[in-house]
Amino acid sequence: GAGADNDLYINQAVVFIEDAIQYRSINHRVDSKSLWLYRWYYSRTCQWILSLTITVILALAFIEEPSSLTITSDVRYRLPAWNPPCGLTESIELLCFLVFVVDVSVKSYLIGWKEFWKNKWLMAYILTLIVSLTDWIVSLSFFCKESVRVRRILRPFFLLQNSSMMKKTLKSINSTLPEMASVVLLLAVHLSLFTMFAMLLFARTKDNQQDKEWVVYFRNLPESLTSLLVLLTTANNPDVMIPAYSKNRAYSVFFILFTVLGNLFLMNLLTAIIYNQFRGYLLKSVQSSLFRRRLGIRAAFEVLSSLKETPASAQQSCVSVGALLQVLQKAEMDSRCKQAIMRSLKMCSCDQLSAAQFQKLFEELDKDAIKQHPPSPEYQSHFMQKVQFAFGHPYFGYLGNVVALANIISICVVLVMDADKQPSERDDFFLGAINCFFILYYLLEMLLKILAMGFKRYLSYPSNRFDGLLTVILLILEIATFAVYGFPHPGWRPEFMGLLSLWDMVRLVNMLIVFRFLRIIPNMKFMALVVTTLLDLVKNLRAFAGILVVVFYAFAITGIMLFKGAIVPLGNTSAANTTHDNGTVQCGTYEQLEYWPNNFDDFAEKNVISWCSAHFQAEVIYYLLYVLSVHLICRWAKIYFVAWWLISSVIWVNLFVALLLENFIHKWDRRCQRESLSDIEYQRTVELMFRDVLEEPTEEELMEKLHQHPHLQLCR
Amino acid sequence: GAGADNDLYINQAVVFIEDAIQYRSINHRVDSKSLWLYRWYYSRTCQWILSLTITVILALAFIEEPSSLTITSDVRYRLPAWNPPCGLTESIELLCFLVFVVDVSVKSYLIGWKEFWKNKWLMAYILTLIVSLTDWIVSLSFFCKESVRVRRILRPFFLLQNSSMMKKTLKSINSTLPEMASVVLLLAVHLSLFTMFAMLLFARTKDNQQDKEWVVYFRNLPESLTSLLVLLTTANNPDVMIPAYSKNRAYSVFFILFTVLGNLFLMNLLTAIIYNQFRGYLLKSVQSSLFRRRLGIRAAFEVLSSLKETPASAQQSCVSVGALLQVLQKAEMDSRCKQAIMRSLKMCSCDQLSAAQFQKLFEELDKDAIKQHPPSPEYQSHFMQKVQFAFGHPYFGYLGNVVALANIISICVVLVMDADKQPSERDDFFLGAINCFFILYYLLEMLLKILAMGFKRYLSYPSNRFDGLLTVILLILEIATFAVYGFPHPGWRPEFMGLLSLWDMVRLVNMLIVFRFLRIIPNMKFMALVVTTLLDLVKNLRAFAGILVVVFYAFAITGIMLFKGAIVPLGNTSAANTTHDNGTVQCGTYEQLEYWPNNFDDFAEKNVISWCSAHFQAEVIYYLLYVLSVHLICRWAKIYFVAWWLISSVIWVNLFVALLLENFIHKWDRRCQRESLSDIEYQRTVELMFRDVLEEPTEEELMEKLHQHPHLQLCR
């Protein structure tokens, strides 16, 4: 009937509006039941459950065998870690898989079968699930004793497929690959030509004293390649040059040429290429989000305009205000926006809305929320008004900064004086006394500010919240200290009592004070700009960070599978002894440098190694290579580490630089405009940053897209 | 008289045209004698003498005491270097100073006294000369025994003041300084806060086994600062983290946080700021060059239009073609341009030229020289024509590349096979034989190409010149080898004869073959693009490189003065013994790592050190610091090295990245256009790269500037 039809149209409009708000695609089924399922699937609870499941399955790596539940990762000291019994992590895994199965079925149903066959991500999702479940069954049938677990490497895929931003970013990275591959090829040519040159230049001579360079770095082809590759990461510069340079100054020309060409030119060329490719990336992604929003709103308009109550005689399609109000009441959206739209709907006296008016109403969604601080309390007493003026004045805040600086300096002085004292000689009285004084001042400052501004207004400033929270924590710590150890007095050096020693308490207080000093940031203009840029960047970087997590995870799991147990403490095995048959520990080896904690025996460990090596640092690589070559898996390890270095350090760092440049330059160009508006605090989003360069989609584009909708049949 | 006036005007026009060609300012004296002096001063000979003088005075550092004239710079092995007798370098220096005195007087005279007082560079030039001469007198009166020579630090100024590009670049860098200073301040705050945190975190504990971190890296404030500063350069990552990480995994959070904030964010922020500042730099400088050119031509037009022969009745000022021809004959310019202008002058039938026509004539100067290759010879014989077709075809070139690749691979195979052989076991027959074969092929290829293309056409391609030259050198080397050692046969291992041993000859030949392999570059599209970008970059970077040389020079000389003799070979002095009183060499110290060649005892040495440390490498700094701290000049050394790291590594590398990004992105955007023109080889200049974005200066701007000329009085 018409009533049921109308209900369906209203529901469709509600879902389309919600799609527009969340920048979702509108290409899903639109019948009543599917709409209910769709709203249920995208409800907060469901999405939260899905995110939790992904987190749980990724976090499993930390507790699975080999678990990371030891304090140290040093193979020499650590106790055998607690490993969960067989079946515990597996049953959690099964639960997660079941959630994913539900997820993939709902998703596939909602987009419809026709679309499903075009969607490669969904197919891959199903494939991954099938492989994981098979592997799970194999695992259980071996009672968890099997060594290779394919499903652990596949896990990050679940994170990847759940985020549309990450999928988009991956596509972008993918399109840059051909050019990156060219530069990498160029690097490879550069490396191989220089390797041949080096082998010819630093050949073995008859005088054994003279060819140190040959012995250490250019003994054979793989070793020469490795030496120069490590030089490309600058990790063994200038070590690799020294023996040759010591022989003749002219040899330095070779190394300088190699570094200039490789590091300065080719590496930076990679940055340039990636930056060039990503220059428009943010803009393009914001543009497509805008298109999705406009499309959703337009779709809502179209379905509402086909409601039966509309006068059929009207030339132009239009929507009645009543229907829109109904939709608004049903739709889930920010209450501020909802109220603003209602208000403008009431102000507009007309009964019918055209498409343009309809779009205009929803422009409220794109607007910044202007944050208004609650007013200060109004005191009657003249004295109180004066107090309010004095302590509400910015100068009082500056005084607070000066006091915080004084506190920092006093801590610094004490640290310098105590630097060489034995712990038993240390007198905690002085530090205790000054900290006590400063914390009292901080408390007073907080109370006076609350008095002057009122509690609500005080809390509405983020800097005050930061300040207040730290002051309260400091106060609690200080009271606890006095409760346990009594008041400070000269020669105050009590014995260990309770949870923490006095010295630890004092250290903790001091660290918090140092941390509290960060409150000065908003007071310095340039710093504030930099910090806001960085915060923006963090928001925009979520997709990249996600992809990095995926890569880290896959590499870590692969590393564990390949190299687990490859590093054994000295003296435990005969393998280690063969390398050091002269009885002493050689300089520059893994053992001498005490890189023990760096091994591949668990997951947390591997991530930290990855981290280190990511930052232009191949030293770990180098020393690990040394040990690994002893264990005869040298070749695999080399390929593994070179791949890791290329992906994490070279490509990811360059991507990061490209995004930073993009963000920063946009922000910088906009600085002048913002300065005039600095009184009003905006809640800035990526979309707003680009507002003035975005192009509105045209009516034709929107309608064309709507007519391509696989499930929605528009009347006209 | 009118004739003398006319002569003067013609001469003025000639000079203005030459100014326009060389992009020089026209603000100089314009009377007859000054014009003569001006042309003499800017004549090739004079400018060449000036450049030579600057080179000589800068190169003096290599032969002055302490001279770099030893093969090795290793203090343990090197013999006492030859030092020039007192008075030799000093007299060369005096000659240079006299040239500079002439230079500065001519320059000052030519711009006129009024302008002189506004020109800070000239004042500084005079001041530098006065200080240098005074120092020179002091030096001679001490018979060269004085230790501090101020004039050596001042020398790079002579290089700086002679290049207008460098002065402009310096101005640009100067305007970026405030923002760079902000980031450096931010870095300093970051560093100091984290240092305090680290000192609190890694405090001394009662258990001596447990506080390795404290002992090695965070013993006191200066040491903690140094540790974290070195971590910022990533040179001691992950070493600095290992002891703490070995104790507890959680400590890695501190180091990761420090590195992410410092290295990834703040350091790249610096890149972003510098890139942002330099984005328009190239364009702006090209724009101002264009303005100078147009101004020079306009000035020439104005002076020519006031010639007496012009009909006074004409409303618009104009220039007679005859006068212009006279000017063109006198002016020194590229003969191709001159002929092109003459040609279009003849084609234009009019007798008088307006300002616009005049400008248009000289647009020939901005145009690319289209390089035309001489035609191939035309052979009568049918057979020869077939031969010409076959060997002139690109496929023949590709075949040559394949053969070169085969040669490289064969060398590679021999190298791998011979890698572990003793020099006495090595058989040079195989390598000798294949090299002989390949060199014969190269010779044949060259001859056939010359036959097909004709000698002139062959030489007109740069790749052929490169190829041919290397082939000829290889041939000469091969013939020399056979002449000295006879033809290769199995077991060919002759004794050492002549200048080089057979093995050295073979190595040299192989290196040249590897080098010759670079001929493949133009055949690969992307590689060709990258290489042309890099070549362009090198052109644009001259000013930056000059400034880098200035900074290098100043730092090197300062380093020599401060730290000369600070590093002494082990066992030579008691100072070295005090640090190693346990009798053995400690791991990780300067001695163990054999950094002997890195010291400050001469100039070439210092430049190499600077080079190493410039590239994100603070290891040298670190170990030098270790030794220097022993010598009690620790503080100065630290400040010196931190300054050096900031200037060379941080700022200069970022400048370089900024320029590379700028250049590359321009080039990349233009790639599509160029592909269509790829048949014609252009001689590209920076100016041409920006042609389509440059703005032509307006008539009003030009005339306003002309009326501000301090010496030229225009009639109207």
Image (spheres, coloured by chain):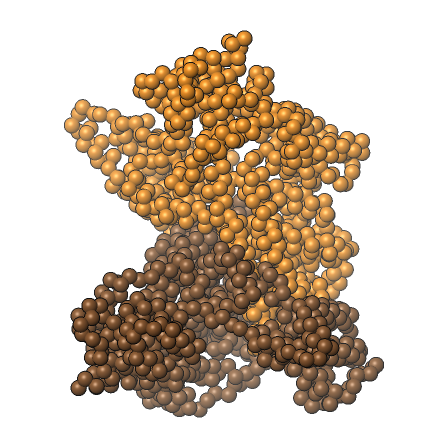
Chain colours: A orange, B brown
Kindly give the residue lying farthest to the front in the view shown. B349
Q: Is residue A301 visible?
A: yes
Q: Is residue A642 above or below residue B528?
A: above
- Asked if residue B612 shows in the view, the reply is no
Quadrant of res A698: top left
Q: Residue at x 38, y 73 (%)?
A: B347
Farthest-out residue, right: B490
* Residue A143, percent from left and from top: 79, 32
Q: Place residue B515 in its image quadrant.
A: bottom right
For the residue pair B318 and B99, the one nearer the viewer reads as: B318
In front of the other: B542 or A421: B542
Residue A618 lies left or right of residue B711; in this view the side is right
With A456 as the anchor, is B251 left or right in this view?
right
Q: Answer with the quarter of the image where residue A195 lies.
A: bottom right
Q: Residue at x 70, y 34 (%)?
A: A128
Residue drawn at (45%, 31%), measured in percent from left and top?
A699
Q: From the image, which quarter does the N terminus of chain B lie in?
A: bottom left
The image shows residue B716, relative to residue B61, as above or below, that is above
Q: Nearer the viewer, residue A402 or A709?
A: A709
Q: How many marks can you see?
A: 0
Q: Position of residue A101 (x, y in %)?
A: 67, 26
